[in-house]
Image (spheres, rainbow, N blue to C red):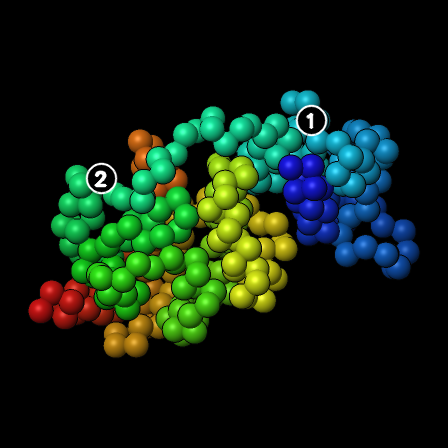
Amino acid sequence: MREEMAEFLRARRAALTPEQSGVRVYGTMRRVPGLRRDEVAQLAGISVNYYTRLEQGESHQLSDAVLDSLSSALQLIPAERIHLLRLSRPWPVHAVPLPHSPERLRPSVLALVESTVGQAVIAIGRYFDLLGANRLGYALYGLGRDKCVNLAKKMFLDSAMRELHLEWEKEVSDLAARLRMTTGDMPDDPTLSALIRELSVNSSEFSRVWARQRVAECMYDQRRFRHPVMGPLELRQESMRLPDDPGQRIVFLSAEAGTDSADRLGLLEALSSS
């Protein structure tokens, strides 16, 4: 966890400019792309030596006061602050026991997903496996009901996903941010670690966006698709966690009423039901 926290701090420091942080700059030559260590230490009100030890992985114990100061200095969003807290105070994996059997949706949740109309719905597991969807959800992503699909692998390794998503770079950046958030929920989970290793080996794009150290929940957003049959679609995404099933969430995608996207989504639903 020490090295993970060190990498996270270095990435967040590099992402901040002096202008964003209100740091006065003398001259035009700077050796680092973002803030210097001494500048972060000054903003956080801690010693340069202590902050340097954190970035070098020599220490990871953060008091509440230091955590608050660093979060403010690095301008962390709430999800990033939670991630830093988890990295500084890791808990054992068994703190949140997970079932060893194959991951499944509860029958009542699956029935809710499959019966939803008017919007595309997909259910995603803790390891980004597709656990279920309604007909429109399958049709939107071009997936078959009889196939086991890992959405993280599909996004980075299937060229069809690059064609489907008009803002593919944003999509993969958000997915990597959600995946990093998941590592905080399940530290040292072997299945999750194996997924990250596989993506790192097989996708240079994953390695690139993973190195940014972004952390985010991404519970709601606008998504833009280029569907091979329906053409462009602008959809609102809302995600809902299932509190009784750690790591599982349902994603709803809908179009604003009266728009071309709503008409196209309705037609796609009709085609998927025929």
Q: Nearer the viewer, mark 1 or mark 2?
A: 2
User: Which residue lies at the image location 64% right of the left edge and 37% below the top edge?
Assistant: 1
> Which SS class for mark 1?
loop
Which quadrant: the C terminus? bottom left
Which mark, by number, is residue 62?
Answer: 1
In this rendering, the count of numbered labels is: 2
User: Which residue lies at the image location 32% right of the left edge and 54% below the top edge?
Assistant: 130
Other-residue count near label 1 (Cα within 10 Å), few / some / many at <14 / 14–19 / ≥20: some
In-front residue for pair 129/222: 129
In-front residue for pair 101/2: 101
- Horizontal and vertical percent position of residue 156: 47, 65
Other-residue count near label 2 (Cα within 10 Å), few / some / many at <14 / 14–19 / ≥20: few
The amino acid pointed to by label 2 is Arg
The amino acid pointed to by label 1 is Leu
- Horizontal and vertical percent position of residue 216: 51, 45
Give the distance between the C-alpha atoms of the residues marked 1 and 2, in whole angstroms: 39 Å
- On screen, residue 95 versus residue 263, left or right, reads right
Label 2 sits on residue: 106
> Which SS class for mark 2?
loop
User: Which residue lies at the image location 48% right of the left edge and 47% below the top edge?
Assistant: 192
- Horizontal and vertical percent position of residue 195: 49, 53
User: Which residue lies at the image location 88% right of the left edge and 59% below the top edge?
Assistant: 29
In-front residue for pair 252/124: 124
Residue 214 visible to the viewer: yes
Residue 43 visible to the viewer: no
Mark 1 and mark 2 lie on one chain; the one further toward the N terminus is 1
In-front residue for pair 128/69: 128
